[in-house]
Image: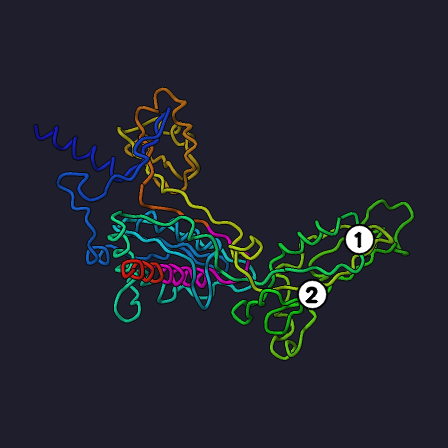
């Protein structure tokens, strides 16, 4: 009887916390740990318990990347946080609707990768990141209480408005291209599109948004770049050479050929070299002798919600943490065979008392190819699962902002959305 109860408890815990990958399907894909669903489990929201269990662990940080674990938050917040990082980190304000979470979740892992504009120079995260959802808001309520209040008003747990997380981290990007001459094989509209996707090394916090309808930009809302390249033959090239790099001069147009044209007093405000493309080796077009590109670019401040070119990150994705369990000892040649079924470093083969014994070393490295299910013997001794509330995030920055700033600003956006949504609910109730 006791064994049956223990087995039932283990089955319930697996259903609550693991997504199990089988040979022909996936089990436990839906979240079920909402209040009242399981007898004997208190899944009701409790802020004190949340603050006790929640933490942020920095896993790795170097010049270009930041990886940290978030322990104790809901999957809805994880997805909202990813969406905000993709296109919504708004510096100096907030906007849009909001959603909220009404119950605690658990363990998330984020990886933020920066590029060339601002390196990640400090191992310590800003206070907003370290405290995250318990940062005081307006001196009275924390973000947790804001999220909890919205969740209770909606009568749901972990509920978020999906369409409110679609874009607010401003950057500077090419908005208009004035083409004076383009005799290259690249059409004007295609060339303009390529130029618009080039990340610009400029802090967007130092600029204002251009007013709708303004045709001419000013020094406070516009950056200008000139691109003027003409391809010619190289008179010193060998007669029998067929290499374009020897035969032609300026036959490849790179971002290094873009020249910043200061407007107003911009030359006094920004030191030389601070306003430029993030990377100087992006290929824009290829030319042949006699072909020329001569154009003027105007860069403005915008958000990813308006256009992907304004997004501060190149990509953002997440996956659930792999959980690999050996149901029985695997020894001898089978141990070596098992290690070959997983990514390198996942299964370690140890020598114990003259026997080779397999053990799970680092499941985080696995990609879950499920190769082990092709082995009729080994597939019965391994359980593959993913931790339902542990997300591994990978975010690559375009280099406009450092990763710790992106995370901090994403938190501010989330707090602002919760505040605005609560205000809207209050206004509806008053009506």
- 217 to the left or right of 245: left
Residue 225 is marked as 2
Q: Is residue 338 above or below residue 92?
A: above
Q: Which residues are magenta?
A: 395-418
Secondary structure, mark 2, is strand
* Residues marked 1 and 2 touching at CB (< 8 Å): no
Q: Is residue 321 magenta?
A: no
Confirm whether the magenta stretch covers residue 417. yes
Horizontal placement of 101 versus 235: left or right? left
**How many numbered discs?**
2
Residue occupying image coordinates x 31% and y 45%: 389
Query: Dot 2: within a 10 Å radius of its alpha carbon, few (fewer than 14), some, or many (20 or more) residues?
Result: many
First in sequence, mark 1 or 2: give its number.
Answer: 2
Query: Disc number at residue 55?
Result: none
Q: From mark 1 to mark 2, how far is it between C-alphas?
A: 20 Å
- Estimate the x, y position of residue 220 in percent, counting from the top left: 59, 73
Residue occupying image coordinates x 30% and y 65% = 135
């Amino acid at each position: 009887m006791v064994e049956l109860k223990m087995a039932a408890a283990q089955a319930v815990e697996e259903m609550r916390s693991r997504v199990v990958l089988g040979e022909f399907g996936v089990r436990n894909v839906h979240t079920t740990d909402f209040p009242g669903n399981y007898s004997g489990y208190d899944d009701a929201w409790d802020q004190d318990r949340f603050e006790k269990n929640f933490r942020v662990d920095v896993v790795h940080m170097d010049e270009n990347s930041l990886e940290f674990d978030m322990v104790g938050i809901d999957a809805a917040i994880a997805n909202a946080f990813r969406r905000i990082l993709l296109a919504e980190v708004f510096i100096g304000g907030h906007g849009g609707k909001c959603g909220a979470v009404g119950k605690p979740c658990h363990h998330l892992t984020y990886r933020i990768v920066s590029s060339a504009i601002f390196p990640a120079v400090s191992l310590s995260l800003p206070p907003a990141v370290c405290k995250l959802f318990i940062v005081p808001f307006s001196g009275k309520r924390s973000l947790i209480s804001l999220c909890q209040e919205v969740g209770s008003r909606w009568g749901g747990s972990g509920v978020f408005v999906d369409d409110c997380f679609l874009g607010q981290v401003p950057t500077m990007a090419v908005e208009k291209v004035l083409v004076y001459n383009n005799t290259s094989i690249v059409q004007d509209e295609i060339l303009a599109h390529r130029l618009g996707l080039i990340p610009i090394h400029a802090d967007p916090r130092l600029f204002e948004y251009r007013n709708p309808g303004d045709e001419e930009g000013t020094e406070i809302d516009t950056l200008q770049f000139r691109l003027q390249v003409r391809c010619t033959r190289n008179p010193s090239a060998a007669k029998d050479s067929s290499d374009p790099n020897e035969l032609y001069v300026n036959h490849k147009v790179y971002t290094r050929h873009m020249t910043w044209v200061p407007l107003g007093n911009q030359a006094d405000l920004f030191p030389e070299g601070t306003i430029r493309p993030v990377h100087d080796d992006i290929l824009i077009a290829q030319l042949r002798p006699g072909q020329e590109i001569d154009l003027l670019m105007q860069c403005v401040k915008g958000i990813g919600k308006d256009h992907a070119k304004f997004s501060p990150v190149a990509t953002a994705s997440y996956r659930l943490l792999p959980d690999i369990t050996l149901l029985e000892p695997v020894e001898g040649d089978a141990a070596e065979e098992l290690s070959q079924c997983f990514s390198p470093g996942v299964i370690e083969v140890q020598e114990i008392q003259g026997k080779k014994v397999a053990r799970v070393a680092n499941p985080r490295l696995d990609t879950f190819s499920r190769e082990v299910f092709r082995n009729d013997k080994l597939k019965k001794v391994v359980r593959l699962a993913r931790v339902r509330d542990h997300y591994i995030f990978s975010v690559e920055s375009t280099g406009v902002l450092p990763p710790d700033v992106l995370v901090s600003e994403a938190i501010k956006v989330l707090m602002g959305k919760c505040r605005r949504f609560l205000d809207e609910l209050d206004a509806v109730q008053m009506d």
